[in-house]
Amino acid sequence: MQSFVAEPDELEWPHSSQGNEEKRNLSLGGHVGFDSLPDQLVSKSVTQGFCFNILCVGETGIGKSTLMNTLFNTMFENEEASHYQNGVYLRPRTYDLQESNVHLKLTIVDTVGFGDQINKEDSYKPIVDYIDTQFENYLQEELKIKRSLFNYHDTRIHICLYFIAPTGHSLKSLDLVTMKKLDSKVNIIPIIAKADTISKSELHKFKIKIMSELVSNGVQIYQFPTDDEAVSEINASMNAHLPFAVVGSVEEVKVGNKTVRARQYPWGVVQVENESHCDFVKLREMLIRVNMEDLREQTHARHYELYRRCKLEEMGFKDTDPDSQPFSLQETYEAKRKEFLGDLQRKEEEMRQMFVNKVKETESELKEKERELHDKFEQLKRMHQEEKRKVEEKRRDLEEEMNAFNRKKVAAETLSLSQPLKKDKDKKK
Amino acid sequence: MTTNIRYKSRIPVKTEDSAEEKQYVGFATLPNQVHRKSVKKGFDFTLMVAGESGMGKSTLVNSLFLTDLYKDRKLLNAEERINQTVEIIKHTVDIEEKGVKLKLTIVDTPGFGDAVNNNECWKPITDYIDQQFEQYFRDESGLNRKNIQDNRVHCCLYFIPPFGHGLRPVDVEFMKALHEKVNIIPLIAKADCLTPNEIKKLKDRIREEIDKFGIKVYQFPECDSDEDEEFKQLDKELKECTPFAVIGSNTVVEARGQRVRGRLYPWGIVEVENQSHCDFVKLRNMLIRSHMHDLKDVTCDVHYENYRAQCIQEMTSKLAQDNRMESPIPILPLSTPDAETEKLIKMKDEELKRMQEMLNKMQQQMHDKD
């Protein structure tokens, strides 16, 4: 028998994911040129175009549409929403924007009717359902046999801007409940809307209160990433400014010798892009200029993966079977299908059984009814015969009476015939 | 500080005309006497403030009465407010100005509209108002009526948030539940978040919606025809300004060389008492300087009387059904209308009507003949 001496590498090769492969660093002799890879990636994505989806959650009239107009410097068409909706519903609108040679397919989803109802216990449900539906659509596309992911219009929500009303005290109860339901499904950035109604000192206290409430209730909001040295510093400082206090405006006012976007009050002019007036510039930087790509990544890598895992586990898929051997999706599919067919058959049997039972029941009922009817008919017949007999008797009686009467009549007539002769004789005398 | 609305004092000055002295009886001094007595007795006023948390109610009350009523109060945070019920808290202060004493009661309604499910969140408030009416009714019908305490709510300031496009369903429901029980004055809170155009649009919208939903807010009484033009003009302006857009402040800032109540922003200073900034001055003048007594009168004459009539009707109909029940309040022996007398009354009414019509016809004929 040949002795088989195995080399260490070969023994470990089937489990390469757990093994310690030796990686060797080599130095290059000259300029190869693969440093142009990022550029190739960039030019490919630019030709493909980008897509970004924003969800705006906030009360009616809090300034969601105005802020979107201000952020993207465009007038998206919007009618004013009414306060008297029966429930919350989501209104997605897609726009194609272009800046230099970059195309952006922007979808803005509005929550219409949020916060208006008297009973707001179910207000968060339509929002959660919408986010889940977008994930589901993507999952379906991913699981298809013939799929075209590169062509797929990704509608998953990348960022949720939560508009907090500037009361100056703390979050509203509805805000807390909604954010808790959303924090595991989407990146949330809370912002303080209509911030020109809060003075600086109040704003400071308000921000601290909001953040402490979020932390103490375990709400996870989006943190700007600090792992990339290029942007870590600015991101870290921005994280400290959350939630951003923003003011939106599309009207232009002349200040000094410039025309800026601002709100004109009798006591002064609030400039949207003035950093000492509000945090609009910070929001724009963070949202659009620095972290847009990171938001998309997080949505895909964290929130979508979580959804996918939960969904597949629900369906019964597992990564390892009881013997802790890696399961193949194929086998799982087969097993599931068999199960499903078995279920179907069983259900069919049940239904058939039920149907047969029902038919039997109805039949016996009908028979019962028939018998009753028959009995009734017999009874009626008997009664009818009784009646007939009685009537017959009466007729006979009547006939007898008539005969008797006739006889008497005849007798009376004959008597009367012999009588009048006597009378006449009397009279003549 | 001069006020713009002049409250015309109705105390006449005695003319020194010797010829008239003989005919001068002297009852023209009655207003004087009323003035003296009322100063001696002192006044009381109960004001209710209602609206969501964070609308600036406490700040406005402090600004109106220039005192600090809300020291050391504890505000709940969002988690505690998810299932909060509405409470009623009363603060009473005695303030005095130029010898006139006022016992001011502020009824606060923390928790209104703060929970996630706000179904019937106005019920504790309507119950409170009814309770005050009932207590006054009992006191009034009692034997010893010397020291009746009037705790009835004379006015309710309702704060509408400026962030929306008009009235919200909860606002409409609240006002409809309360408009027959108390004088409602709607206010637009935190008006420093609206530009003058936006304020105008919002006010028009709110006035429209108040009409549409049939809400009866407090109406200023018409001014008498003998007032001078300036007063009438001011009154008209006041009426067109409702609902008032108010701003309140607890802090004093320096503006244009003076120390005023205001809010300091990086882009300017909002002065609470500047008429071009907000309607605070109009509200204060209306509420305190000219219409405080009218609010009390309307409460006594209209809202309370409605309540009383309703109460009595309920009681008598109950008595008619169940004669054994003793009423806790001694009522005058009212003739309980039973069905027959009612029928008779109806018949007589109809007869009267017919006769009236005939009379009218005859008069018409006579007139035509002439």
Image: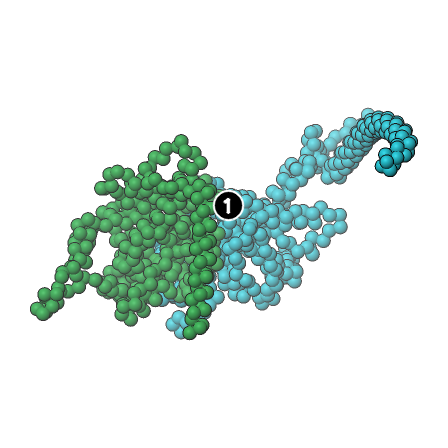
Is B35 drawn above or below residue A351 in the view shown? below
For this rendering, which residue is in front, A179 or B154?
B154
- Residue at 58 percent across and 67 percent down: it is A100
The percent coordinates of residue B158 (x first, y second) are 38, 52
Q: Quadrant of residue B327?
A: top left
- Left or right position of A186 against A13: left
Chain coloured green in this rendering: B
Is A218 drawn above or below residue A137 in the view shown? above
Position of the C terminus of chain A, as image quadrant, is top right
For this rendering, which residue is in front, B316 or A404?
A404
Residue found at the very far front of the displayed protein: A429
Residue B67: in sight, yes or no?
yes
The percent coordinates of residue A266 (x first, y second) are 36, 66
For this rendering, which residue is in front, B122 or A165?
B122
- Residue at 65 percent across and 47 percent down: it is A136
Chain coloured cyan in this rendering: A
Q: Quadrant of residue B289?
A: bottom left
Tell me the chain of label 1: A
The percent coordinates of residue A364 (x first, y second) are 81, 28
- Residue at 61 percent across and 60 percent down: it is A94
- Residue at 40 percent across and 31 percent down: it is B324
Q: Amino acid at mark 1?
A: Asn
Which structural element holds mark 1? Answer: loop
Q: Which residue is mark 1?
A: A119
Q: Specify few, some or many for label 1: CA neighbours under 10 Å numbering under 14, 14-19, or 20 or more.
A: some
Is B249 drawn above or below residue A258 in the view shown? above
For this rendering, which residue is in front, B178 or A184?
B178
